[in-house]
């Protein structure tokens, strides 16, 4: 057969496969949004959930998801940034210890989220005595998210051309000053993109939180800003049913008469937030890159 025809056939097959994947994903998203958007309203987004009666919302669950995400990123981002800088800039690339660390990161990144949840339950909930709480969920999500963010930071730093490092050293900067003032700003768009994408993944996580953050959403006293009080919105020691866990709970327990509507609306909100994280990551990354490179 003519090589040009073979190439054309192979190209068309690849286009067809890509098109099938796009159609499947688009169909799934449209199905969720078409079913859920009619149930979304301001009352639905702000009112608390109800059991055994209709008219409940997802206000507390949505707040818990955002608050838990913030606490998780506060814990995991500095750790992953430091680990990524060490592996990229300071670690001996030929050392068996570095290879062991990278292998461990790859193994951790492939762990099922339910295994991370059980680990968090045994360590943070039981052994450390935090109980079902936001801090337990945030620590479990840190274990879940840290390998991925570390790899993202490392790859973003490695993508910076070696001449940038040589230029910094030639100007008399120390190694750390070169990393801090030259390498990290150049790699910042990729790092931020990875952080925002990781945030979207954390926002939709459920299995790891069922065993750590809990499956209930107690009423919050919005006038109580004591971080040690379990009724305070900013307390990290209270149970916090997130939006993804709420969807699972509503479909699993059947205690909500309009559970199908609540589940559909909550699923649509979850998808919208994840899409915002993904599109936001690319938008912010491009803006920062164009600002830093003056392009």
Image: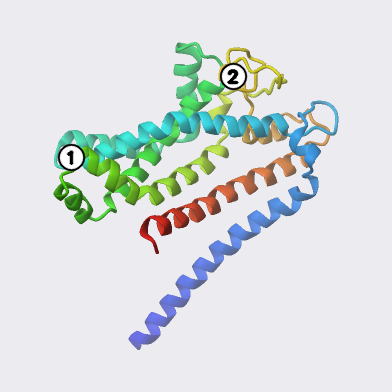
User: Which quadrant does the N terminus fall into?
Assistant: bottom left
Sequence-first tag of 1 and 2: 1
Q: Which residue occupies the foreground of this view, 102 or 21? A: 102
For this view, does 272 lie left or right of residue 137?
A: right
| Circle 1 SS class | loop
Residue located 45% across and 71% down the image: 14
Q: How far across and how far down the image is residue 164, in percent?
A: 23, 53
Q: Is residue 135 visible?
A: yes
Q: How far across and how far down the image is residue 129, in percent?
A: 49, 11
Residue bearing the label numbered 2:
235
| Circle 2 SS class | loop
Relative to 84, does residue 293 appear above or below in the rendering? below
Residue located 79% across and 43% down the image: 41
Q: How far across and how far down the image is residue 153, in percent?
A: 35, 43
Q: How far across and how far down the image is residue 262, in percent?
A: 76, 38
Residue located 84% across and 34% down the image: 55
Colouring method of the image: rainbow
Q: CA distance from mark 1 to mark 2?
A: 42 Å
In contact (CB < 8 Å): disc 1 and disc 2: no
Residue bearing the label numbered 1:
174
Relative to 255, does residue 182 appear above or below in the rendering? below
For this view, does 187 lie left or right of residue 214?
A: left
Other residues around mark 1 within 10 Å, as few (<14) / some (14–19) / many (≥20): few
Other residues around mark 2 within 10 Å, as few (<14) / some (14–19) / many (≥20): many
């Amino acid at each position: 057969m003519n090589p040009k025809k073979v190439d054309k056939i192979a190209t068309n097959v690849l286009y067809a496969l890509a098109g099938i994947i796009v159609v499947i994903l688009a169909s799934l998203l449209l199905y969720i949004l078409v079913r859920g958007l009619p149930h979304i309203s301001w009352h639905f987004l702000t009112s608390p959930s109800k059991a055994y009666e209709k008219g409940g919302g997802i206000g507390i669950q949505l707040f818990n998801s955002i608050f838990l995400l913030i606490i998780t990123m506060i814990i995991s981002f500095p750790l992953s940034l430091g680990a990524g800088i060490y592996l990229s800039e300071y670690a001996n690339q030929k050392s068996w210890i570095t290879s062991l660390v990278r292998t461990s990161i790859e193994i951790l990144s492939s762990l099922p989220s339910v295994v991370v949840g059980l680990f968090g339950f045994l360590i943070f909930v039981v052994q450390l005595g935090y109980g079902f709480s936001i801090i337990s969920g945030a620590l479990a999500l840190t274990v879940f998210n840290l390998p991925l963010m570390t790899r993202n930071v490392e790859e973003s730093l490695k993508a910076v051309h070696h001449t940038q490092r040589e230029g910094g050293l030639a100007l008399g900067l120390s190694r750390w000053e070169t990393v801090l003032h030259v390498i990290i700003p150049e790699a910042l768009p990729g790092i931020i993109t990875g952080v925002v994408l990781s945030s979207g993944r954390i926002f939709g996580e459920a299995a790891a939180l069922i065993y750590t953050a809990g499956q209930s959403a107690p009423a919050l006293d919005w006038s109580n800003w004591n971080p040690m009080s379990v009724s305070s919105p900013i307390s990290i020691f209270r149970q916090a049913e997130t939006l993804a866990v709420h969807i699972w709970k509503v479909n699993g327990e059947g205690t909500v008469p309009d559970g199908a509507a609540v589940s559909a609306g909550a699923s649509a909100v979850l998808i919208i937030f994840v899409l915002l994280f993904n599109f936001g990551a690319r938008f912010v990354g491009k803006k920062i890159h164009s600002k830093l490179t003056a392009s």
